[in-house]
Amino acid sequence: MSDVKNSIVEARLHWDAHDESKRPRIRQLVEDVAKSRAQPIYVILDPATETEIARWQGAPLPNQTDDFREFLRLALP
């Protein structure tokens, strides 16, 4: 997994931001990027175009480790 971790940028959008002034922007990002309030949702975006490459909804289960690793590899150049 280190090849993936060293090559991607992870962003987390937390609804319960302590700074209430950030909540509207976070809500907008969730609507624009995740397109769902369900959590967690993993979305891989093309950094140049911000178009969605792949999506994984829900926490990966223990028997999905290899599938989730392959999903993350979709983010690699």
Image: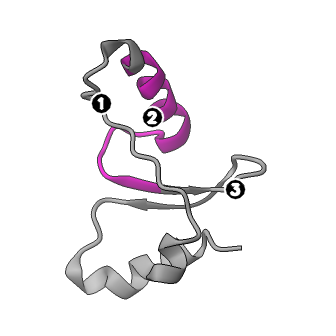
Residue in the picture at 32% in, 36% down: 14
- Mark 3 is surrounded, within 10 Å at the Cα level, by few (under 14), some (14 to 19) or many (20 or more) other residues, namely few
Specify the quadrant that holds the C terminus: bottom right
Tell whether 9 sits left or right of 66: right
For the residues carrying marks 2 and 1, which lies nearer the camera in this image? 1
Compare marks 1 and 3 and give the one earlier in the sequence. 1
Q: Residue at x 30, y 30 (%)?
A: 15
Dot label at residue 46: 3
Q: Which residue range is magenta in the image? A: 23-42
Q: Which residue is mark 2?
A: 30
Q: Residues within 10 Å of mark 1 (few under 14, many from 20)?
A: some
Q: Position of residue 24 (x, y in %)?
A: 42, 16
Sequence-wise, which precedes: disc 2 or disc 1?
A: 1
Distance from Cα at disc 2 to Cα at disc 1: 9 Å
**Residue 19 percent location from the top left of the image:** 31, 18
Q: Is residue 58 magenta?
A: no
| Residue positioned most to the top | 21
Name the residue nearer the viewer: 7 or 49: 7
Q: Give the residue type that dot 2 points to.
A: Val
Report crowding for label 2: few under 14, some 14 to 19, many 20 or more residues within 10 A (C-alpha): some
Tell me which amino acid carries mark 1: Trp
